[in-house]
Image (cartoon, rainbow, N blue to C red):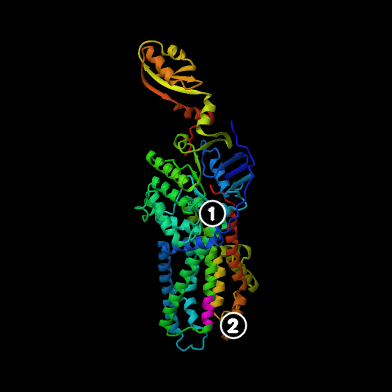
Amino acid sequence: MTAVEAVGLCKRYGDVTAVDRLDLSIEKGEIFGLLGPNGAGKTTTILMLLGLTEPTAGKARVDGLDATRAPLEVKRRVGYLPDDVGFYSDLSGRDNLRYTAELNRVPNEVAGSRIADLLNDVGLSEAADRRVSEYSRGMRQRLGLADALVKQPTLLILDEPTVNIDPEGVREILELVRGLRDREGTTVLISSHLLHQVEQICDRVGIFVKGRLAALGTVAELVADVQGGYSIEIDLEGDGDPRAVLEGVDGVTEVEQNLGGWLARSDRDVRDDVIDACRSAGFSITRLVGGISDLDAVYHTYFGGTHGDDRR
Amino acid sequence: MATIAAETPTTTVTDEEHAPQLTGGWKIVARKELGDHLRSSRFVILLVLMALAGLAAVHSASGGIRDAAVGAADVPSVFLYIFILSPDRIPSFVELLGLIGPLLGIVFAFDAVNGERAQRTLPRLISQPIHRDDVINGKFAAGIGAVSLVLVAVVAMVSGYGMVRLGISPGLSDLVRLVGFVVVAIAYISVWFGLAMLLSIVTRRAATAALAAVAVWLVFALFMGLIAGIVADAVRPVHDDTNLSQVLANARLELNTRRLSPDELYQETTEALLDPLKQSTGILVQSPDDSAVPAPLGLRQSLDIAWWQLAAIAGIAVALFAVSYALFLRQEIRA
């Protein structure tokens, strides 16, 4: 069943088109990555899905509910972690979550234990009764995740959840999200400009550029589309002409110099053949990487070189 | 590139049993906001400030009453005079409230909305299952609630002090008038609360809103009398060959100019309410042989002489609320 559906969704601010005829559907239980540089319209799309901003045209539906016409029912189901989430700094983390529980009409007797469990899940049990003003950025982010889960959402929307937190924190948050999907079957929509960070947990990703969906599919599909094949990075030591050796391997279509090493493109996986050829030509292989740079190629193709961290 | 196919059939979910009642969101917001107000240091500061000012005013007024009116037992509603008399150059309670009451309103509203923006809590708040106007309505209710609490507490305390000091207790009609006064004072302070709320919506920073509100307050509190005098003298000058109609025209224009200030409207309303002997809010011309003490008015009659001022106060407050409400609902979340 469809958890999220956008049909011809448009949002214009004056002359600026933030979101341009977006068609998208996300299945229940799917982890979907909405990827794109800052200013691509990701947050605007999310606000329309939540019914917080009215679309100029088109429809946004969550669980089949029109976000514009039934915003309360939609907001009852959707847990939202905003970009750069904020809390009432005079209140403790626990009291902030309690307010959210009240706003969601979670009965008091249920709320207490649910909040305690969530705080435990995100590793904030010890800090729960300290004022949020004393929290670090990473702690706020984790509190934000707990906050989004207080209402036990069927759809979880995370807007840039990994920005400005350390790599270990990123890993923890993503693992929590994946665990939640596996246990509860929650649908997850992650918006990010950091493809590397979120691609590992996304079932599918959509690449969003200048208000339009430029590509949609699994990461592997996107990579194959962009590359039209495979690539190998290889660093060699020894005498001779590595270019000739690499070009001599059957299946290799293109060889270029790459940061002191070599980059070979091919139409199929030729790693074993390349290793054999280099060995028999008397080279020793100091480094060989297959596939890693493919994500960068996706980046370059769609983000046009803007890696997103130029704003803010 | 695979762009997704449109139009998958939609299933409309109507699971009534899963959906709790989602009405009354403003009450949840109001409860939280009121809690914040009551725990805040500004609440304590304002309460102490108003209590001290009120005690000083009532102390001085009741002293005056004791000295002057030991034999004047026939004056009706002596008790209420503790709020309006000002011997010893200490302003009366009513005057003091007119002066510092605006602060009370401003303090509970100047950071109501821009504070949420600064803390970046607004997107999180309105993504919960409440209507957008629940946020602003809840903040209105909580603010007016906090203002009312302070006022009722101060008036009750000050009344108690006056009763002990004068050794008299108010009659039923006095109490009714006193309650009326509190209601008028709440309406008057609501004007300033509404102004500060409006400023908190249109300005980005709480400090800007506070400063702007205080500036407006100072203009009305300190300079309105001056401005009114200048306007009156410019438009209806009084020449040397004084005749009564010129003087009257001047005085009338000055009064009407002053009535642009909520403070003046409030003073006229409360004086009519608290002083049954007050016959009019306009300008009285007294002839030399007019020495008779006027008969006290009933509550209805007292209200009659100040009804439009009361309506004006309420109208200004409601208008400010309405504009704030409309602006807040139209604002972009990320603005």
Answer whether labels 2 and 1 touch (C-beta < 8 Å): no
Q: Nearer the viewer, residue B111 or A195?
A: A195
Q: Please, is residue B302 above or below residue B321 in the view? A: below
Left or right of B259? Residue A257 is left
Q: Residue B298's mark?
A: 2
Q: Residue at x 59, y 69 (%)?
A: B255
Q: Nearer the viewer, residue A189 or A251?
A: A251
The residue range painted magenta reads: B173-179
Could you tell me residue A304's position as x and y percent? Answer: 53, 29
Q: Which mark is residue A124?
A: none
Q: Which mark is residue A76?
A: 1
Determine the secondary structure under disc 2.
Answer: loop
| Percent coordinates x, y for residue A147 in the rendering | 45, 52
Amino acid bearing label 2: Gly
Q: Main secondary structure of the magenta part?
A: helix
Which residue occupies the foreground of this view, B13 or B225? B13
How many C-alpha atoms fall within 10 Å of the one at disc 2: few (<14), some, or many (≥20)? Answer: few
